[in-house]
Amino acid sequence: MLSPSEIKKLTQEEKEKKASEENSAHHKPSLLTKLRNYFFGGMLVTAPIGLTFWLAWEIIIFIDDWVRPYIPQKWNPETYLPFALPGLGLFFIFVTLTLIGFLTAGIVGKTLLRISERLLDQMPVIRTVYGAVKQIIETIFQNHSNAFREVVLFQYPRPGSWALGFYTGDSNRLIKDISQDESINIFLPTTPNPTSGFLLFVPRKETRMLTMSVEEGIKMVVSGGIVTPEYQAPDEEQEKLIEQPTISDAKTDKSDKDVESQKAAS
């Protein structure tokens, strides 16, 4: 025989169990809710892949339509086939660039290249454009170049407001002499189009080198800050850079020194 207290306890447990079952049944998602969640889950998985393939396909078609008219018919496989070949333009561009690189690697090719550059140097406007484009491409493709390999943080457009930029190299001697400081070149991209932006010459001591990669920095700029990289603890070299004074710190130190000098003079 159960005592009245035990019976009461069992009755209370049964009531709680029944209430829990009713509560779980009440909050159980409906079939429509499940279908909606599955749909958005599938969209999150397939949308990036689909957009990537679509963009790649559009680029291939654009290049094919641009290159195909310049391919001689006797060398064009589509002349002998009843269907088009996607990627034919990319293939011919690859073959053409490889042949040009092979020819310019020899003595004859280097001689012709020097003659062509001398002719371009005689043209006022073209030589400026050619020289700038050549220097940019050589800088990007040089293995020992530090261009666009570091992400920096600096105060812009006013103290206390920080901007994300890319370190592209050290400033030349003329800029350093004018600024009276060790300045570096920083490319400040615009959002969401990072191909446009501003070139700024900022003192090195007023910048912060970040541990994120250039790819992560570009993603952050394109997404407007929505996509942010995971935090990485800085190494010893980065910690030294972080400890450097900022613009506001430098102004504060200067004002403190002025106050001390005024007190000493009085």
Image: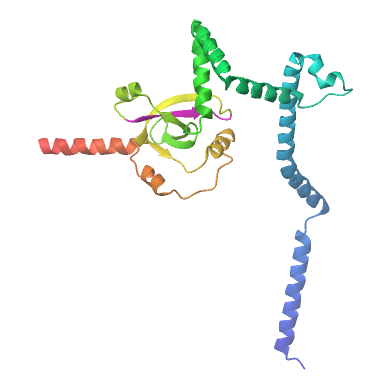
The quarter of the picture where residue 70 lies is top right
Magenta-tinted stretch: 182-192
**Image point (81%, 15%), residue name:** 74
Q: Position of residue 167 (x, y in %)?
A: 45, 32
Does residue 126 appear in the picture of this structure? no
**Image point (72%, 43%), residue name:** 44
Say whether residue 187 is magenta. Answer: yes
Q: Position of residue 108 (x, y in %)?
A: 57, 16
Q: Nearer the viewer, residue 51 or 21?
A: 51
Dominant secondary structure, magenta: strand
The quarter of the picture where residue 153 lies is top left
Does residue 203 appear in the picture of this structure? yes
Q: Compared to 101, does 155 lie above or below?
A: below
Is 258 on the left-hand or right-hand side of 17? left
The quarter of the picture where residue 255 lies is top left
Q: Compared to 165, does 71 lie above or below?
A: above
Q: Compared to 70, does 161 lie above or below?
A: below
Q: Compared to 216, does 231 lie above or below?
A: below
